[in-house]
Amino acid sequence: MRIVVDLNRCQAYAQCVFLAPRVFALHGEEALLYTPAVPAGEEERVGRAVAACPVQAITAGGAAGAGAG
């Protein structure tokens, strides 16, 4: 699974950070960092994070290796 965060839309509510801390992190108070290729076993947490984003800034789908390279 791969994810993309629209950083222009993201308002740093950090719901994703609480739900999937191995994938999302806040740098400072507003800058979101994330791992585009979701680690194995984190898909369910990331799915919850996608659903919980109040501004719908996160999209997920596809295989982790898709488009890599």
Image: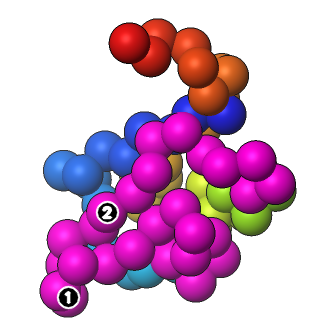
Identify the residue at horizontal 38%, vertical 47% (top origin). 5
Question: In the rendered image, which quarter contains the C terminus?
Answer: top left
Q: Which mark is residue 14?
A: none
Residue 56 vertical placement versus 59 (above, below):
below
**Direction from residue 32 to residue 2 in the image, left or right:** right
Label 1, label 2: how far apart the Cα atoms are: 11 Å
- Report if residue 34 lies within the magenta region: yes
Q: Secondary structure at mark 1?
A: loop
What's the image's color scheme?
A: rainbow
Q: Quadrant of residue 6?
A: top left
Say which of marks 1 and 2 sits in front.
2
Label at residue 29: 1
Quick one: 16 or 41, which is closer to the camera? Answer: 41
**Residue 2: image location, x then y, percent:** 57, 34
Position of 1 with respect to 31 (left or right) is right
- Give the residues drawn in magenta, as a range: 16-43
How many numbered marks, from 0 up? Answer: 2
